[in-house]
Image (cartoon, grey):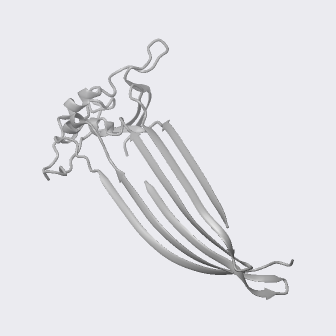
Amino acid sequence: MSLYAELGYVYMRSKYSFPQALSLSLTATDALNPFRTGVTPGFVGRPVRIFFDTADIADPSVFEERETIRGVLGVKGKLFEKWEWSLDGSYDYNHTYTSSNNTVNLLPSLLGAGFTGTDAVTGQPQVPAPQTTRRAVYPVLAITASSPSRPPTRTNIGTATVTPAP
Amino acid sequence: MTTNYIGIGRVTGPVYELPAGPLTTSVLGNYTVFDRTSGQNFANSDDLYLLLSGFPYRNTPSSNPNHRDTLSGRNGGRGAGVQ
């Protein structure tokens, strides 16, 4: 009769961040729209979608941790002349933890229409703060493009792309 | 989080002598206890949600425990190669 055992441990940890594409749709009469109605006398205006990068807000990030512990304990022996038997027990434990942080995800909603559904607790309709109040929190197109002498401190409109809204 | 307890008992031996060698069979019993718990939790700024919706942030945590006991058996045969 013989005894056998096996023990294993695996630990994995990762952390990464990634850029997120953000866009803001502006109507033809939106005050932020550089092609808005009446921006020059007689200009009709047209809706646009602006793609932007937030240079002063950290990119979304993900932290992940995985742990695995595994153990086996067994015993085996002979049965009669040519037969063998074995009995073993194993235990394994896996734990995974993931934490993600996305600060910019709600920015388009903050600058756009806000939420217009119903509150999950009260069932009452959601009423966003006035758009001017919300846009004052993060004046998305108001500040600096990047330049060698003045690094971006707000939205990096140097990487913004303006396209006609569909 | 997942945990597994597995117990396996096995008996192996020859049942028939072929010209090329013994035909071996194995009888196996397996008992497994499986547990898994998964869930999500969220956090956000009440101030931001008051601006967005007029209400504070409503967290919707979830948890999904899962337990399973399994008892199974198996029998398999194997012919030996040319010896």
Pinpoint residue A150: horizontal percent, then vertical percent.
44, 14
**Which quadrant of the figure contains the N terminus of chain A?**
bottom right
Against A79, is A106 above or below? above
- Residue A120, x across and y down, in percent: 19, 52
Residue A46 visible from this viewpoint: no
Q: Is residue B39 left or right of residue A18?
A: left
Up-down: is A44 above or below A98?
above
Whether residue B49 sits left or right of residue A159 in the image: it is: left
**Above or below A150: residue A71:** below
* Horizontal and vertical percent position of residue B30: 53, 73
Describe residue A37's horizontal placement relative to residue A73 as left or right. left
Quarter assignment of residue A115:
top left
Residue sitting nearer the eye, B63 or B34: B34
In the foreground, A129 or A163: A129
Identify the residue shown where x is 24% and y is 41%.
Answer: A113
The answer to which of A44 and A146 lies nearer the viewer is: A146
- Between A166 and A51, which is closer to the camera in this rendering? A51
Q: Which quadrant would residue A131 be assigned to in this image?
A: top left
